[in-house]
Amino acid sequence: MSRTPPATRADYCAFYPIATRWKDMDAYGHLNNASYLSYLDTAVTLWQLAAGMEIDQPGGLRFLAVQNGCTYHAEARFPDVLHAGVRCGHLGRSSARFEVGFFRNDEDRACAEGFIVHVLVDAQARPEPIPERFRPVIEAILRGG
Amino acid sequence: MSRTPPATRADYCAFYPIATRWKDMDAYGHLNNASYLSYLDTAVTLWQLAAGMEIDQPGGLRFLAVQNGCTYHAEARFPDVLHAGVRCGHLGRSSARFEVGFFRNDEDRACAEGFIVHVLVDAQARPEPIPERFRPVIEAILRGG
Amino acid sequence: MSRTPPATRADYCAFYPIATRWKDMDAYGHLNNASYLSYLDTAVTLWQLAAGMEIDQPGGLRFLAVQNGCTYHAEARFPDVLHAGVRCGHLGRSSARFEVGFFRNDEDRACAEGFIVHVLVDAQARPEPIPERFRPVIEAILRGG
Amino acid sequence: MSRTPPATRADYCAFYPIATRWKDMDAYGHLNNASYLSYLDTAVTLWQLAAGMEIDQPGGLRFLAVQNGCTYHAEARFPDVLHAGVRCGHLGRSSARFEVGFFRNDEDRACAEGFIVHVLVDAQARPEPIPERFRPVIEAILRGG
């Protein structure tokens, strides 16, 4: 169990609203843990698309998730809106670790914080270098950068 | 990105088949990363129910997820059946880290390995000790135990 | 297969934006049919909450879905935003049929149209009359009303 | 609200077990209505694959859902296993209506009954005739056939 205190909005960069859905809750009446990983996937992809990365287009980039995870600080529920802040935790040659903080409604303390490690791959799922033109775009959201 | 080689079935204890669904795949034509976290949640809950823990019953135990994560070794897709092996990675006073290896069809190398940290809480979401009667049950699936 | 031409926004009343998620797409690279039923459930619940119905509160109203369905006119995909327009198709003593049209981004022709029949039930899942104070609220969005 | 009494297993043909998942439940502590539509999609696809239809293969068949729906007779919950029985309600030139009855655990009365209308389409989403070799396979599960 993480003892790290929740981050604030100032710790994250680009924000995307995630409107929760009734079905995101489980029988405990709160957002199920797996729901957050789908929000995270969505927020990172929205950032990548906004940054000009042609995800899921013919001949476009294809990022494989090789690891993900999330730490939960507080419960949330439908109809809360979560504001997902995206930053990059680490940029490698073929991979990048994207980190996302989730902020409930107008709260400034994260209710959850997660990450996903993406590896850029070719059609045969072999890693390939992240194109030079995208490196400064990613560096602009590097944590503490 | 994890460099740990995938575990084998011998590294895990209780197994539950997870039949994948068409909708578990995303536009990449493989099981979406968030789908695995839902499988994991389900496998651990099935183990807890089989172990006699009264989850989600009036007056029953309530486990909160405080952290989860997953490492992906290889892609899988519908209609694969994933065999989810459950073990305990750590048993604390109020919390337990459950680890799950996913094995595709008859493969012996995990295609994914994840974990969830559960904290037992009362109705006000305050941690409470895991009942003594459940400790030996959990210890029986302790990693390396 | 429905031969009815798609409705326009003028045919529906209260609108809620539904931001699609990466995972809502299936291996065909479009929004999976089951995703729409979750959008529909969410839009109707948002309307009910905005109308003052205390869903999922202690002692609050509990609506059971007894039937639902959807007709698909055109494909949509992430990151489309669907605008869900809600209306009431029929108001009974204990039940109401809510109808939802989905409009992609700024389009005026529905890409999908669905419905859900809700029955108000008590704790034992027995139908009970819709409270008088909610009838005019529902009647205000009656189709052709 | 449907007044049709629930069907029995004898009314359906090919059966597939659907193991429910913790996350399939919503805040009402029962399987969410949208979950059933995903089960239905999965059961029909499993039947199609078993019948030799090359779904989602390069150059394979592509079925578009143009309509779906479900009637709910009784609530179910995790960890219930639903047994999904598939039959064909109507076979057209390019389309087929597949109907699915859901039977909880060892019950013989359906807890839910749904359908999906599939249209076979080419790469440009234009209807094309169902191949002759598949017609007798589908006719073998025609309702009342």
Image (cartoon, coloured by chain):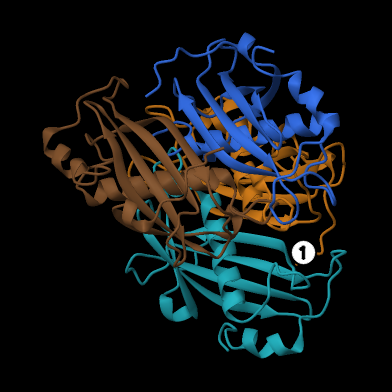
Chain colours: A orange, B cyan, C blue, D brown
Of the pair A142 and B99, the residue shown nearer to us: B99
Q: Where is residue B89 in the image (x, y as percent from the top left)?
A: 62, 77
Residue ID at (74%, 40%) = A145
Quick one: quadrant of the N terminus of chain B? bottom right
Q: Is residue B29 left or right of residue D4?
A: left
Chain letter of the residue beneath label 1 in the structure image: A
Q: Residues within 10 Å of mark 1 (few under 14, many from 20)?
A: few
Disc 1 marks a residue whose amino acid type is Ser
Residue ID at (78%, 42%) = C55
- Above-or-below relation of D58 to C105: below
Q: Position of residue C65 (x, y in %)?
A: 61, 42
Q: Return the residue at label 1.
A: A2
Residue ID at (45%, 64%) = D107
Of the pair A88 and D64, the residue shown nearer to us: D64
- Above-or-below relation of A107 to B50: above
Q: Is residue A89 left or right of residue C136?
A: left
Of the pair C138 and C5, the residue shown nearer to us: C138
Quick one: quadrant of the C terminus of chain B? bottom right
SS class, disc 1: loop
